[in-house]
Each structure stands twice: as structure tokens, then as C-alpha cells.
Image (cartoon, rainbow, N blue to C red):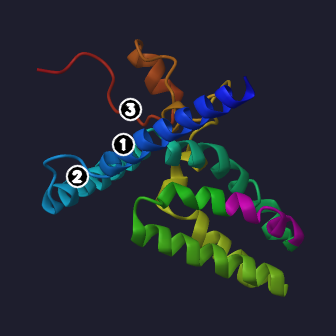
Amino acid sequence: MARGSSASARLVVLLAGCMALRLAQHAFVLPGLSRRGAFQAAAGAAATVGAQAAWADAQGEPTMAFGKYGPTILGLKSAVDSGDLKAVLKREQKFKLLNSYWRNSPDDFQKVTSLTEALLDAADAGKASEVQKLYTEYTSLPEFDILKNYPPPKGKALSMNAYGRNEFESDPVKTADKGFFKVGDVGPPKM
């Protein structure tokens, strides 16, 4: 009985090997696909991967980074003014995360990255006056105006749209009285 099961096991292994060999001949070659077709398929796959990356950039990560880390960097003003360079160095990662806001604009990203590196190098070297100058230059970028000039958002909002939100949107008089909207003459149009 042991002999029969051994022979049947050998037969099963032999048949499995034959089938694997038969399938392996066609495993990596699609029938009717030329080298040109394979190259076009690879190029199409590469283009699809790029489209997925572009779609990911449209999800708001840069704006989230700015809304989350921008106030932290602006909060360093008192530490920079007092010469507390250790506080600046402790926020190195926050600077780098904030710089990701500009990642889709290579020229701007290079500018803020070089400013940040110079600022952190000066802080590491103990040059407080240079840190103050570079910090002022960094935070005087136009993107920081919205964080400096408008009240902070209420609640857990982190988007740029939450800054300067007008709770009196349906009332033009209250909107004008709010102040930071700089609304001119309020009322019906003059004819």
C-alpha cells in the first residue's frame, strides 16, 4: 500500500511540474504583444502614477501645513526678539514642515528652504542679531499676512478659509463695523 501511494504521489508531482512548465512559458509574455506595445503599456503606467501624485497635491496638504505650523512659527517672535535661540532650534522640524507649503512652487520652496537653513545655522552659531534679521525676512513673506492681520479661527479649523471668516455675512452694516474687512460705503447703490 505504501508503494501505491508513493507512485501516485510521484504522478501528482510530475503532472504539477508539467503544468507549471506549460504555464511558465506564457507567464511573462502576452500573446500578440510586441516590444512596442509593451513599451507603450509601461509609459501609460508611468503617466498614471504621475496623475495620482498630482491628484494628491490637490487635496489641501500645503494649506493644512500652513494653517497648522504657521501660527507656531509666528509665535516664536518673542523668543527671537529676546535672543532665546534654543527655542528657535527646538522648532526646527516645524520650520521644515511649514516649508512644505511651498513645495509645489520650486523657486519659492528653494527660497524659504535656504532662508530656514540660514536662520537655523545662525541660531546654532549663537548669532542672535542675524536670526532676528532672517526671521523677520521669513515671516514678512506675503503668505504670512493672513495669519498676522486676521483673528485666529474659532474651533478646530485649520484651513486658510477659516481665517477672516465673517459671521455677519448676511448683514453688510455689521460687516462694515467689524473693521478688518475694510468695506467702504455700505448701503444701497447710489444712482
Tell me whether the residue at label 2 lies in contact with that at label 3, contact meaning CB atoms closer than 8 angstroms. Answer: no
Question: Which callout, 2 or 3, points at the residue further toward the start of the chain?
Answer: 2
- Type of amino acid at the residue the image marks with label 3: Val
Residue, disc 1: 23
Note whether residue 90 is visible.
yes
In the structure shown, which secondary structural element does the residue marked by tag 1 occupy? helix
In the structure shown, which secondary structural element does the residue marked by tag 3 occupy? loop
Query: Is 89 inside the magenta-drawn segment?
Result: yes
The label number, if any, that marks residue 161 in the structure image: none
Q: Please indicate whether residue 145 sits to the left or right of residue 81 in the image.
A: left
Identified at 22% across, 52% down, the residue is: 41
Across and down, in percent, residue 104 comes to 41, 58
Work out how far the residue at label 1 is from the one at label 3, CA to CA, in angstroms.
Answer: 75 Å
- Type of amino acid at the residue the image marks with label 1: Leu
Q: Please indicate whether residue 56 sits to the left or right of residue 125 in the image.
A: left
Tell me whether the residue at label 1 lies in contact with that at label 2, contact meaning CB atoms closer than 8 angstroms. Answer: no
Identified at 49% across, 37% down, the residue is: 16
Foreground of the two, 20 or 43: 20
Over which residues does the magenta segment extend? 86-95
Q: Is residue 181 above or below residue 187?
A: below
Across and down, in percent, residue 182 comes to 42, 37
Total numbered circles: 3
Tell me whether the residue at label 1 lies in contact with that at label 3, contact meaning CB atoms closer than 8 angstroms. Answer: no
Residue, disc 3: 183
Q: Quadrant of residue 181?
A: top left
Magenta part mainly helix, strand or loop? helix
Judged from this view, the residue extending furthest toward the top is 170
Foreground of the two, 171 or 67: 67
Identified at 63% across, 51% down, the residue is: 70
The label number, if any, that marks residue 41 in the structure image: 2
Indicate which label's residue lies in the foreground, 2 or 3: 2
Q: Is residue 36 above or below residue 114?
A: above
